[in-house]
Image: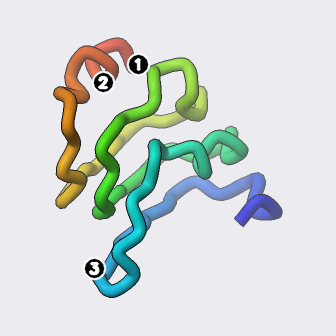
Amino acid sequence: LSQLKKLESFILLDSGVSRVVYQGADFVLDFIHLRNLGLAIHMPRFPDQYRFPPNLAQIRLKYCRMEEDPMPILEKLL
């Protein structure tokens, strides 16, 4: 994934088989052209607003089971 620098849309869907717990969306930091992000993964914490790509226009979250409310961070994004 790190070689896809010009990626504009990315959706990560965990089927539940892997039982992986993601510790934030750190893997999207290198995608400076990313405009659309969809996450359907178990992600207990949300990264702060400074860790998102600058061109991000849309975020879709589903099945994340976050332990903290992500709205204080999401409301700061452009």
Which amino acid, by three-letter code, is at mark 1?
Leu
Compared to residue 37, the image places residue 29 above or below, namely: above
Tell me the element at label 3: loop
Compared to residue 66, the image places residue 20 above or below, namely: below
Residue at 49%, 45% (x, y): give it. Answer: 25
Tell me the element at label 1: loop
Label 2: few (<14), some (14–19) or many (≥20) C-alpha neighbours in 10 Å: some
Describe the colour scheme in one phrase: rainbow
Which amino acid, by three-letter code, is at mark 2?
Leu
Residue 78, which numbered label? 1
Which amino acid, by three-letter code, is at mark 3?
Gly
Taking the image as shown, residue 55 lies to the left or right of residue 21, namely: right
Q: Nearer the viewer, mark 2 or mark 3?
A: 3
The residue that mark 3 highlights is 16
Compared to residue 72, the image places residue 2 above or below, namely: below
| Marks 1 & 3, CB-CB < 8 Å contact | no
